[in-house]
Structures are given as structure tokens and as C-alpha cells.
Image: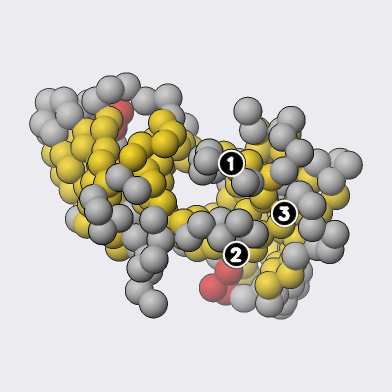
Amino acid sequence: AQKITQTQPGMFVQEKEAVTLDCTYDTSDPSYGLFWYKQPSSGEMIFLIYQGSYDQQNATEGRYSLNFQKARKSANLVISASQLGDSAMYFCAMRVVGSNDYKLSFGAGTTVTVRA
Amino acid sequence: KAGVTQTPRYLIKTRGQQVTLSCSPISGHRSVSWYQQTPGQGLQFLFEYFSETQRNKGNFPGRFSGRQFSNSRSEMNVSTLELGDSALYLCASTFLDPSKETQYFGPGTRLLVL
């Protein structure tokens, strides 16, 4: 079974600053994928970034980067140059990769509020 | 390419009724998963369909069921609705790319049970 922990219920960040969202995970499977999703108040889950357990480099997608520390089982999301539109709920998720189990296990989420 | 679509977007039902939600995946995606999101329980996996077959099921009562059609569109049904079924129901589709298999979500259906 997979477990995701997000310990920050809410965060405030000033516009144009960077913010780091914490995510730790627990799994006994050697091959897994870690995902970050953004959920605005409208409800839709927007895929942001993916990190595979065997990826040697940290994933980056535009202003999003994932700080992957495998030994510590952490996959923190860094949002650089925050914008007002970044205000949303952010979820860390994981699943076993390469199996027929497509279940995503989600953390509780972190609410980010960007201040002007 | 169009994203995942879900209908209806909003729904109000009363206890004891049944409801059917629909999900159309991204073109070419054959796997469809359903999730329930509530303030108390967070995001929970309901089930996943691939090629019209249910491959995985979460820990939900038998009142929750689903199916997938040959065009990969999926429906989920909840019978004998309870107040606790009020939630945002999210559908996600996956293109079976071995490198990522990312799930892309639809806008969700907000169900309110009175």
C-alpha cells in the first residue's frame, strides 16, 4: 500500500517569490511514480509534474520543479516566481508504475494563497 | 486535443434516489479511473476500467458501480443515495505510455444529496 503525507494544510506566499510544498511518501514497491496536481476552486485537477522512481534527475516543467530525495522518500514541489493564478490546492500523489494498478494515492493537499 | 469531459457538472438528488455520471476520456486514452473527493476523506479511488473491464476497485460499497463502453466512455452509478455520497466525483483518463501513464482529470461532477 502507498501512503502520501502532506503536512502543510495552508501556505501564504508573496507574488514573484518561490514556495516549496512538502510531500513524503511510503511504499514498498521499487518502481513508482510521483505526481503533483493543482486544483483551483473550480474543482478540476490539473497535472503539473511527474517524477519516476528511477529518474536520475529532478523533474522540471516551466516554473515547477520537483525536489526528489529518494532515500528520504520525499518529493517536494517548488513553484518559482509565484503568480496570483497559482492560488489553489496542491496535491501530491503516487502510484505503482508498470503494473495494472492505476490507482493514485493522494495526500491531503496544501492550500496555497498568493498575495499581491 | 479535447480534454476529459464529465456530465453533468452539477447534480442535486434526494436520499434513496440513484444517479448516473458520465465521463468521456481524451481521445486515444483507454483507461478511465473514478475518484470521490470529500472534505472529510479527501480523494479516494473508486474504480478503474480498461477495455470495458473493471481492473481495480476501491473500498466502496456495492452501491457504487461503473462500466465502460467500447469507445472508452465510462459511466458510474450510485444507487440508494445517502447524504454522505455528497462529493465531487472526478474522472481521469490515462494513455498507456509506459514512461509516465499520467492520469488527466476532468472538471468533475458535484453531487449534492439532500
Give the amino acid type for the residue marked by disc 3 in the picture.
Gly
| Of B67 and A13, the residue lying toward us | B67
Q: Determine the chain carrying the residue at label 2.
A: A
Residue neighbourhood size for the residue with mark 2, other residues' Cα within 10 Å, grouped as few (<14), some (14–19), many (≥20): some
Write the residue at 75% across / 65% down: A59
Q: Can you name the residue that lies furthest to the top here?
A: B61
Identify the residue under disc 3. A52
Say which mark, if any, is on residue A48.
2
Give the amino acid type for the residue marked by disc 1 in the picture.
Ser
Vertical comparison of A65 with A16: above or below: above
Write the residue at 42% across / 24% down: B59
Q: Secondary structure at mark 1?
A: loop
Q: Cα distance, mark 1 to mark 3?
A: 14 Å
B80 on left or right of A93: left
Q: Secondary structure at mark 3?
A: strand
| Of A86 and A68, the residue lying toward us | A68
- Which one is in front in this view, the residue at disc 2 or the one at disc 3? 3
B51 on left or right of A29: left
Q: Cα distance, mark 2 to mark 1?
A: 22 Å
Identify the residue under disc 1. A99
Write the residue at 84% across / 46% down: A70
- Labels 1 and 3: the sequence-earlier one: 3
Q: Quadrant of the C terminus of chain B?
A: top left
- Which one is in front in this view, the residue at disc 1 or the one at disc 3? 1
Q: Determine the chain carrying the residue at label 3.
A: A
Q: Cα distance, mark 2 to mark 3?
A: 14 Å
Q: Determine the chain carrying the residue at label 1.
A: A
Evaluate whether residue A91 shows in this view: yes
- Which one is in front in this view, the residue at disc 2 or the one at disc 1? 1
Is the image coloured rainbow, by chain, by secondary structure, or in one colour?
secondary structure
